[in-house]
Amino acid sequence: MDLGFAGSTAVVTGGSKGMGLAIAETLAAEGARVAVMARGQQALDAAVASLKSAGAPEAVGISVDMADADSIAAGFDEVAERWGRLNCVVHTIGPADGYFEQMDDADWDATFALGTMSAVRSIRAALPLLRSADWARIVTLAAHSIQRQSPRLVAYTASKAALASITKNLSKSLAKDGILVNCVCPGTIVTASFTENLKDILAADGLDATNPWDVMTWIDNNFHQPCDLGRAGLPEEIASITAYLASRRNGYVTGATVNVDGGSDFV
């Protein structure tokens, strides 16, 4: 299926690793010129090399601190100078987590700065470019925890719930401009950072943190939140649905909150 990305331009925030990189690679393979925004230059350089190999010779990495409003604005100014327009923004930034008793006001502020305000600032900076394009899409990544609560993710989940609400609201206000806006809610996804952070914990239970079936076994045993397919997901499985929602081919889906979680007990 041709998603209509040929000749288009895209920004993926948090696009240097994990789900963000998988999404950026998918857009590149579909023919988009892709800019990835993240903080670490080494990871950005590696991501750009991967995107060029995937089919985006004009791929660029832009160093942006997503907790800083001026840095975000400067990043999108660079996109404007380079391309002059923008067809889609995919926002994948996620904050840290913690239990309620562990988090003070500064922790809550930092979580909302990354989990919510980074998206607000990115979309605000991108809107003039999106409006000048012949078609435009916005996709945000929230989390399935906004519907299936976990005590260790209290501030993270609150920030992502706010993001899902903002996304839904934007779908209404931007409909008159023909800009489609949707939210993807990933379940448990086996990324490199997930594996690195939890490999020793899973290994203590005789489980492999790179194995999607073992990962879901650990999730079920510890959090009692299984999924119908019995395994965790992979970054490319988030990338495929996100790429469709971000594409010209998507002409009528807007305001949706899409669970990509292997099946769950909520709607």
Image: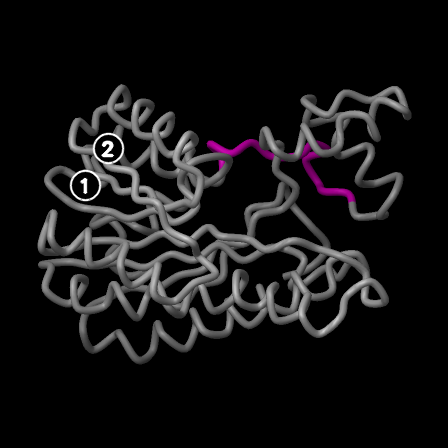
Closer to the chain start, of discs 2 and 1, is: 1
The residue indicated by pointer 2 is 30
- The answer to which quarter of the image holds residue 265 is bottom right
Quadrant housing the N terminus: top left
Q: CA distance from mark 2 to mark 1?
A: 6 Å
Residue shown at 54%/58% (left/top)? 142
Left or right: where 107 falls relative to 166: right
Vertical relation: 101 (above or below) 49: below
Residue 45 is situated, as x and y percent measured from the top left of the image, at: 34, 29
Q: Quadrant of residue 120?
A: bottom left
Occupied quadrant, residue 155: bottom right
The reply to whether dot 2 and dot 1 touch (C-beta < 8 Å) is yes
The disc label shown at residue 5, or none: 1
Q: Which residues are magenta?
A: 226-237
* Figure label count: 2
Q: Secondary structure at mark 1?
A: loop
Q: Is residue 249 left or right of residue 17?
A: left
Position above or below: 181 against 197: below
Q: From the image, which quarter does the C terminus lie in?
A: bottom right
Q: Pinpoint residue 153: horizontal percent, then vertical percent.
A: 73, 58
Residue drawn at (33%, 42%) of the image:
36
Amino acid type, callout 1:
Phe
Rendered position, 68 above or below 15:
below
Report x, y in % for residue 136. Answer: 20, 59
Residue 16 picture location, percent across and down: 42, 36
Mark 2 residue element: loop
Q: Main secondary structure of the magenta part?
A: loop
**Mark 2 belongs to which amino acid?**
Glu
Q: Is residue 231 within the magenta segment?
A: yes
Viewer-closest of 34 and 107:
107
Residue at the location (49% across, 62% down)? Answer: 257
